Amino acid sequence: MEEMKNIPWSISGEEMAIARECIDKALKAGASQVRVTVNKSMMDLFMFLNGELDKVTHSGDRSMVLNIFADGRFGTFSTNRLSSTDLDDFILKAVGTVKMLAEDACRKLPAQERVAKDAITGLEMGNYDTTYAEMDSARRLSIAQSATNFAQARPEGFTLISEEMEYSDSVYDTYVLDSNGTCCRHTESSFEIGCECTIEDQEGHKYSGYWWDSSSRFDRLGVQDCCQKALARAAAQIGPKGHRGGKFNMVVENEVASRLINPVLNALNGYSLQQQNSFMVDSLGKKLFPEGFTIMDMPREVGANGARMFDSEGVATVNTPIIEDGKVARYFINTYISGKMEIEPTIEDATRAVIMPFFKEGAVPEGFSAKDMIKKLGKGIFVTGFNGGNCNSATGDFSYGVEGYAFSRGRITNPVRGMVITGNFLELWANLYAAGCDARRCMSKIIPSLAFENVDFSA
């Protein structure tokens, strides 16, 4: 682990040795199987309010989680005290507690042929940027100062009331090992910037706009234009008009489109399926989405945000379809739920979902974006934000407040607010018109702008 020595706050060789000792101690105390996960993270944050430094934060965190299996029973315990004396008593009490719980024969470690064998150094996915080790307070302050736009802003037709901007960077290190021989590690850095601007128009109405960016690589972070984009998004909301209810075409901006895909991914999770709390029960292999529509899980794209080589059990991830050509291709089944449902295990969750470009009318035009969808559909509502609402996970029925813009003849006409969309997720996705090529790479799920036909809006 020579290459890890220059990574600040990474898991040390001593901490790894302690984790291995914990497995031995738990087995001697009566556990039949043990998994230990060590997590360490460190974060620095600089916040500017109206162009002035307002807050500086430095935090570090370390924890160890023990999953103990004993006599068909299971329990999870965590501590941040990693001294041998403290751990002796902690482990004895943990194993004793587990033995008092109800039996559950489905609780066990994953089979060794399923776990990751190639996550050795933690650096294999290219998610750690050596620039992080070069950061100090002066450089962080300089980056944050260069991003703030409050003093330079020259708004016309409105007043800039406040600008809140945050720059942060962090490092995360995870080490997983178990009594079956699993040993894997993941290390990543993260650089983030976000800005929220609040403005007031000439009639005294206030509007807020937000923009952000994130990357594991500092040179990919959009620092300089973050606050300008937040201000522009606030200004674009001035002068909203009412809009009648009815069935309309809907284009959903890539920035917020995850609101419509997350319920689908959650419904494919084993816990939801096993509890019959999913509108995707018995959907495997069924065509519930338009022909040609595909969602991939792409956790092994080197250098990509959200890329991981293993899940929390240490099970190896794999690039694979979730929805393939409209058919449900994969459930997310961990070891425990596999036993409960008596089906083959996969991994515990969608690690890095990627919606592939799709166009109902044929080949996807190059660079297909929300702007292009608006032109193609001609008339409807362009949704750029969600305001509350809910989804029934068992039925797929939903109701969400939305804001955005009306468009007509392929062009945005005016901002709209106070509208609500209602429907059922299976029906909504059956009416998918397009998925663009404009996903933001800063997100862990690669979700582009989406377009749907015949969506129910109420004012």
Image (cartoon, rainbow, N blue to C red):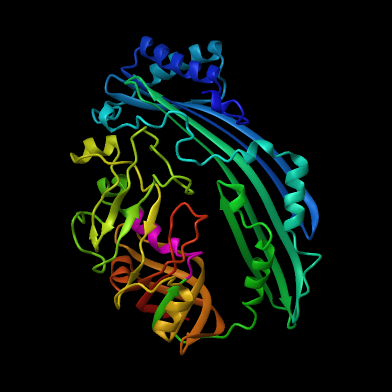
With respect to residue 75, does 272 lie above or below?
A: below
Residue sitting at x 44%, y 83%: 375
Residue 258 falls within the magenta-colored stretch: yes
Closer-to-camera residue (130/331): 130
Question: How far across and down, in percent of the image, does residue 87 sit?
Answer: 51, 15
Closer-to-camera residue (291/237): 291
Residue sitting at x 63%, y 31%: 8
Say if residue 441 shows up in the picture.
yes
Question: How far across and down, in percent of the image, does residue 454 sit?
Answer: 34, 80
With respect to residue 200, does 36 lie above or below?
A: above
Question: How far across and down, in percent of the image, does residue 138 sit?
Answer: 78, 42
Left or right of 107? Residue 371 is right
With respect to residue 255, does 77 lie above or below?
A: above
Left or right of 207? Residue 129 is left
Residue 172 falls within the magenta-colored stretch: no
What span is in magenta?
253-265
Residue sitting at x 28%, y 42%: 333
Name the magenta segment's main secondary structure.
Answer: helix
Question: How far across and down, in percent of the image, does residue 419 sit?
Answer: 49, 77
- Residue 374 picture quarter: bottom left
- Residue 20 picture quarter: top left
Say if residue 100 shows up in the picture.
no
